Image (spheres, rainbow, N blue to C red):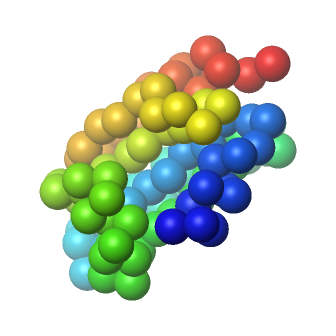
Amino acid sequence: MDKFGNIVDVNVPVLFCFYADWHETSVQMNGVLKEIVTQLGNKVKVVKIDVDKNKELTKALKINGLPTIVIFNQRELVWRGEGFHSSNLLITELVKYLQ
């Protein structure tokens, strides 16, 4: 959990994708995440979190569906969604918090 606090304590928006390798829709999000990194580069931070390897964090954030996308800005949760989301939608959400 300390590691999580360090990750969100940055000056850029942070997008977390909670996923599992065995979950088809989670795997489909890989292309979306790559597109976000390609378009926004170091203006944002994109972090994938394997729910099977991070059960404590998954439970603390009440992650129930996969994939779950969570966006933090200035240590605050500002957006959350479950299931597949397009890069356009996520980029639109992220740019709201760019400085």
- Residue at coordinates 31% horizontally, 59% vertically from top-left? 60
Residue closest to the eye, 7 or 69 = 7
Residue 6 image point, x, y percent: 69, 58
Residue 14 image point, x, y percent: 62, 43
- Residue at coordinates 38% horizontally, 66% vertically from top-left? 57
Residue closest to the eye, 35 or 57 = 57
- Residue at coordinates 44% horizontally, 55% vertically from top-left? 17
Position of residue 51 in the picture relative to residue 90 (left or right): left
The reply to whether residue 30 is visible in this rendering is yes
Residue 3 image point, x, y percent: 62, 68
Q: Which quadrant is the C terminus positioned in?
A: top right
Outermost residue, left direction?
Answer: 64
- Residue at coordinates 67% horizontally, 56% vertically from top-left? 7
Position of residue 62 in the picture relative to residue 69 (left or right): left
Tell how many labels. Answer: 0
Position of residue 62 in the picture relative to residue 21 (left or right): left
